[in-house]
Amino acid sequence: MKVLVLVLACAMPALGIAGTLSTTTSNNGTGGVFMNLIAGPVPLDITGFDSYFGGTGAANVEVWTRPGSYVGFDASNVGWTLSEVVAATGAGTATLAPIPLATPISIGAGQTVAVLLHGTTSGRALRYTGTAASPPVTNWSNADLALFSDVARTGNVPFGGTRFTPRCFAGNVHYNLVPEPASFIAMGLGVAALLRRRRR
């Protein structure tokens, strides 16, 4: 039993790890910002974001998704799905505020999902970045997740307002890795082999 516990303790960090991909701070806005999220070799669920708002207090954020890239599809909600509306609390232009998702956004290994985060509360829409560097950074990645972002739209109406580019998502993306069933099977076989060896 001790062996089983030890093996599971060692395996779980690799099989169910939570992670965060961070981009940058905001320097202009407000409105909404588009991004492509690309999973690495392991499927994952996006569980939430942290970002900056134009003001403090209650702030609704619409979360839109579509399979594949947003490039060429940022002027209309055709082909997009309104995943949920998050009741967030803006913390101002210089402090990150959480945007937790009640319904995680699932991304298969190597797949791309486009996301639009758009603040719809007057005075507390999302901020973004894009004027601090020339050219601004539009790509971020780690071993699990890559992010591309270069379009934002002003105002409180998703897909409306003035389009600016390059403008990029500012903040953090939170995710959980979702192991393939084969990973659990392999782990179970390894545990079984260790237990058989121990009995001998």
Image (cartoon, rainbow, N blue to C red):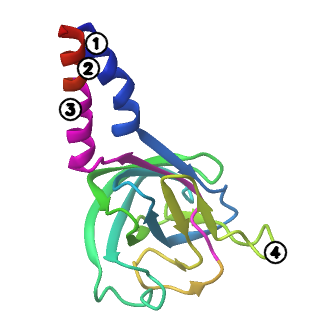
Q: Of all residues shown, which one is farthest toward the front? A: 200
Q: Position of residue 153 (x, y in %)?
A: 52, 80
Which picture quadrant has residue 85?
A: bottom left
Residue kind at label 2, given as amino acid type: Leu
Magenta stretch contains residue 183? yes
Q: Which mark is first along the chain, 2 or 4?
A: 4
Q: Nearer the viewer, residue 185 or 17?
A: 185
Q: Secondary structure at mark 4?
A: loop
The residue under label 4 is which amino acid type?
Ser
Callout in the foreground (3, 2): 2
Q: Which label is found at residue 134?
A: 4
Which x, y percent locates residue 3? 28, 12
Q: Is residue 163 left or right of residue 25?
A: left
Mark number for residue 194?
2
Out of 110 and 48, give the one closest to the viewer: 110
Mark 3–mark 4 CB contact (< 8 Å):
no
Query: Is 194 placed left or right of 32 in the picture?
Result: left
The image's mark for residue 3 is 1
Of callouts 1 and 3, which one flags the residue occurring earlier in the amino acid sequence? 1
Q: Nearer the viewer, residue 160 or 137?
A: 137
